[in-house]
Image: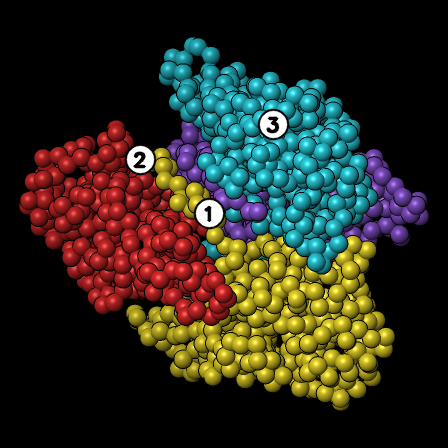
Chain colours: A cyan, B purple, C yellow, D red
Amino acid sequence: MKKLIIISSFLTTLVIAGFGQRKTVNLPDIPGYVTLKCDFHMHTVFSDGDVWPTVRIDEALRDGLDAIAITDHLEYTPKKDFIPVDFNAAWKIGETYARERNFILVHGTEITRKMPPGHFNALFITDASLIAKDSVWDSFEAAAKQGAFIQWNHPGWKSQQPDGIPKMYDIHQRLIKNGWLHGIEFFNDNEYYPLVFTFCNQYNLALMGNSDVHGAISEAYSGDEYSNRPMTLVFAKNKSHDSLKEALFAGRTMVYFRDMLAGKEEYAKPFFYQCISVGKPYYQNDKSMFFEVTNRSDIPFYLFNGVKDAPSNITLAANSVTRVVLSKKVTVPLVYDVKNVLTGENEVLKIELK
Amino acid sequence: MKKLIIISSFLTTLVIAGFGQRKTVNLPDIPGYVTLKCDFHMHTVFSDGDVWPTVRIDEALRDGLDAIAITDHLEYTPKKDFIPVDFNAAWKIGETYARERNFILVHGTEITRKMPPGHFNALFITDASLIAKDSVWDSFEAAAKQGAFIQWNHPGWKSQQPDGIPKMYDIHQRLIKNGWLHGIEFFNDNEYYPLVFTFCNQYNLALMGNSDVHGAISEAYSGDEYSNRPMTLVFAKNKSHDSLKEALFAGRTMVYFRDMLAGKEEYAKPFFYQCISVGKPYYQNDKSMFFEVTNRSDIPFYLFNGVKDAPSNITLAANSVTRVVLSKKVTVPLVYDVKNVLTGENEVLKIELK
Amino acid sequence: MKKLIIISSFLTTLVIAGFGQRKTVNLPDIPGYVTLKCDFHMHTVFSDGDVWPTVRIDEALRDGLDAIAITDHLEYTPKKDFIPVDFNAAWKIGETYARERNFILVHGTEITRKMPPGHFNALFITDASLIAKDSVWDSFEAAAKQGAFIQWNHPGWKSQQPDGIPKMYDIHQRLIKNGWLHGIEFFNDNEYYPLVFTFCNQYNLALMGNSDVHGAISEAYSGDEYSNRPMTLVFAKNKSHDSLKEALFAGRTMVYFRDMLAGKEEYAKPFFYQCISVGKPYYQNDKSMFFEVTNRSDIPFYLFNGVKDAPSNITLAANSVTRVVLSKKVTVPLVYDVKNVLTGENEVLKIELK
Amino acid sequence: MKKLIIISSFLTTLVIAGFGQRKTVNLPDIPGYVTLKCDFHMHTVFSDGDVWPTVRIDEALRDGLDAIAITDHLEYTPKKDFIPVDFNAAWKIGETYARERNFILVHGTEITRKMPPGHFNALFITDASLIAKDSVWDSFEAAAKQGAFIQWNHPGWKSQQPDGIPKMYDIHQRLIKNGWLHGIEFFNDNEYYPLVFTFCNQYNLALMGNSDVHGAISEAYSGDEYSNRPMTLVFAKNKSHDSLKEALFAGRTMVYFRDMLAGKEEYAKPFFYQCISVGKPYYQNDKSMFFEVTNRSDIPFYLFNGVKDAPSNITLAANSVTRVVLSKKVTVPLVYDVKNVLTGENEVLKIELK
């Protein structure tokens, strides 16, 4: 009693949507702040990237981001035989393009040195060409003079740190002392560096997560459901360039990549509770109560270490309602570890389902 | 400067989520009513389907539905050599299973006759076995006695109506006169019957859209982004079995399949405006104003026939924000036809972007 | 009795494969020739494209192509404020890069004029800068002097031909008379122009199918199973630059896009029979014989208009074995129309399942 | 210069292919044998599964398998209030259905006991009802009398073996001594048990890999590229029921799941070399030679531990051609470990690229 397929989608006969459209990303605001989705590290043909600057804005819009920085290298310009070096080119090309799209483009550049000190992005600058100096220290000073937010990039990158473990050299200590270092990448490309969490706490630096993409973003991150690029979630007073800058200097960030979140408990906890709501029991029988937990966000949460007689683990799939069957024997609070929300180098978020 | 891929998703090392979880479907409520997502036509091994009744509930939960009816055939039980005929089996197996999952199971059955009159589902019944009668008229009477909501299934199915065009026979007129016919399928499986819209208006019947699935739902509807099953959206006073029944008898339905919606303008218009919001202009230049339209729903909207100097068509992709660049020459209201929202056999919804 | 998911794929813990690898495309050779998969129309940052030339080679390798031409515009260089005009830049950058990857890069350029005559690609050239002339006729002459294969691009493009129907102007006739026009695009981007088939037959021109891609190819063609880019299949004596050129001038091409193939019957027929094999009957009962048809290619074939008592249509899905149940009443040859293989403007391939 | 999308696929307007068609699986034969793709463990509504027996055959055809066994439980029939117990029902329903589809259905059943001895499938039986005995030993004897091939199912299943490590009890030793045990599952569902490899070598048992699926197969294995079900590859003299049986008793098997293969070196080595071919160098420069390795199979191969100066690892993606750039300094054979082809509990296949 099966019938033929005779309806085709309207979609296939129309203009394909997508490019130039902004996907709705389900990552909630937290009380007092809007959550800006940002990526502060990427390249174009003006250094060693493979795409034109406007592509970076189109990609970011489609991924639902609010802000990016294009950070072409100062010291590495392998395409210069064909493209004259212009450290501000991406900014000049992108500035109006972004504004017309209700999108925040941050003027940035990458200071690109051997380790130590390694690679650094200077963000919110006014002229990248003034930061290109022989001495790396002079570069930092020039960036600082422009009011830059300076982040240390991929501190555990194996090409510069063969064991993969980030290391604070003397120059990093001096940068911090001078107030010239404000953030460190925890996520970069497809890597992460757990120790960065400890550095951030110790030196009061913002946790950063960025793609460092060189080719097309859709090829760098694809394949399954949780293949979004790394991003920095910035908790800003409102969606604007200046609020974004204020929030970064204040260190109000979390980082997000695939199905992993990391950030200080003071941000991770309210963020989690904004994602989740716990319903009233809708049914019971002799042994058990039944209730639902709604996860309105794009991030799944893996709850572990349930209390005695409660489910030992619960997966709150993204954008889903999960049924919990709870034994009536359980009388203590329903506390769990959230395995994929890191609040420290070796700590995960602890929450309660109320 | 590309690095190795070293992070794998947490997901792959954990229990796969999904089954038994309810996907969040972005189909908004309308003022005064909650929108219940329903499928009132499907089969199991107790007639000519291929799955066990609980599978139908699990599938529907995962698809984000609120209610289903399992409607095994009364007159067609090809598995009876192995499974004794029991017209209420799916209901008995599913009733508690659904309740434990905060899910509405509607007791139903399918009256399965040659055309005329064809196939009909009786919904909200109390005992299917009492509806199995030699005379089809007796079956209708028995269903009506149980207070059933009766829908005419796939009226243009080519096995019964070779030209594919639904036809009202004398018996259908008599059913309507008796108050024994309350809805007609506009969508069934992968078909739709435009003329049904006219019948519904003429005889005050509810527009219905259902899957009539026999195998696994995930195999019947798969492949691309808009591959959801057909469903009936019911505008009910609240999410409960009784409210659902009241709303169906009151004819408060729309139907939804792939990227097509159909329903009376009195429901389609508020539904559309609940999906969409139009932002304030965020930028302008000499010639144009720039603003954004947010579509918070899972349904794309294809806007056509724009006024002079406005974009002639706009695709509001699902769960996306679309930028509109509007010439300052435009002074009249921004009215559009919504090509994929049908409000009549040959009519589409007209809206205004305010 | 369901168990936990505890195996994760090796893949997720390893370097992601793909870039720099060549997908195996299942498009068979035909007797006497190898089938080269080619795309002769695309852009980079050296005209109005958005990517670096090596990206085009990497994309093509991944898509399983054997050859491409990069054809930046001579008359349209909107990025010239940042990138000095160099009509041979893509060739200089790509030549060795392609050779190291066992890939054929064809030196090309696009003559870009108003209609008439419109846009043309000159392929197998030696110096694009010599083709940039004030007079379009001089450009053609310069290209011809370099031994170029010249194709007319998107002759029905609505920006130049508002009704979408290709039209032969006087200049086209003169080009043909001079031997300066050798092919026409039937597929371009997501369009096709049926009338081109008739032009090709009338004037003995090669049928061409190309992407004309400007951004990342993976974003231009994505979404479902049949989302490959348009390509020109060239039947060459062997896989080499010179054989490719010889075959193009000899007009030995078919074009392929999504699930559509088009080409002269002399190529389409052997190509189809190389994709397909018909098995011996493996079973029979009173009424029917059962046999299998194997489709080893990536292209599905939709067979229609079966003879009396035979299945009226058969879909031979790509890379699949299809069971055919044949009534024993059928005694005539099993001939079919192949709906998605065009052999003329209004003709489809006729085949027999032997 | 971007154009509208105006071609829709033919596919969407036609009957959807797929069900009832057999996917072409790229898993090569080895010299002297055909490779039969098999799954010998699955359930239907006749025990605790959720689908009708013919669904299992349709699913297997679509997955490209050659043979399955349906193995409903003898001792666990939770649906018996609605479906009378009939241990041969799946066989009766499926026998002709399979034959008409050129598909091998193996008559089987599952002996389902507490550990020890646990669960066992008896395959190639003649009457399952005669194997249902009070004493498990009597069941084995009855199966053996029917000439059954007997496999031990999921020996490390945590519900029966809480530490997940398979353990040979006395009864298993006695079964082996009697010649009543012929295979053990290495893969079951989403689990695998490394120690099984050692048991197979020690007691000369066939390595088995099966799905043990209860619901729809498409829901049990889905999500990414390597989501095929577990299968047993059987190296048979030809594709027939009897050859399959002969090969199993002779222990000529490998097992395959996701991107993992396991089997004795005598099968794994020729299988690998049938998947792979190494091309002649196509290019060289001062330092390096360039050649291609083609992997014609659906399985990627992860090559590790390259010799000095050679690439330390190479990923041969499935159905792809991989370019290898080899330093001219390398003079020794290009040997590698294939990380995802296990040839023992702690051994992987060693190969040479010649």
Q: Which mark is residue C15?
A: 1
Q: Chain of mark 2?
A: C
Is the N terminus of chain C in the top left, top right, bottom left or bottom right quadrant? Answer: top left
Relative to residue A99, is residue D342 depicted above or below? below
> Disc 1 and disc 2: Cα gap in Å?
35 Å
Residue A124 x/y as whole percent: 75, 33
Q: Which residue is mark 2?
A: C1
For the residues beneath circles 1 and 3, the answer to whether they share a chain is no
Amino acid tagged 3:
His
Secondary structure at numbered mark 3? helix
**Which residue: 72% across, 87% down?**
C179
Q: Which of the two discs, 1 and 2, sits closer to the camera? A: 1
Q: Are marks 2 and 3 on the same chain?
A: no
Mark 2 touches mark 3? (CB < 8 Å): no
Kind of residue indicated by mark 2? Met
- For image coordinates 55% across by 27% down, the residue present is A168
Q: Quadrant of residue C59?
A: bottom right
Name, please, the residue furthest toward the front.
A135
The residue under the point 56% across, 23% down is A199
- Secondary structure under tag 1 reads loop
Give the label, 2 or 3, closer to the camera: 3
Decide: few, some or many residues near mark 2? Use Cα within 10 Å; few <14, some 14-19, many ≥20. few
Residue A98 visible, this angle = no
Task: Residue at 18% x, 35% y: name it.
Answer: D167
Marked residue chain, label 1? C
Whole-percent x and y of residue D83? 29, 41
Residue B354 in picture, x, y percent from top left: 84, 38
Q: Residues within 10 Å of mark 1 (few under 14, many from 20)?
A: some
The residue singled out by tag 3 in the image is: A172
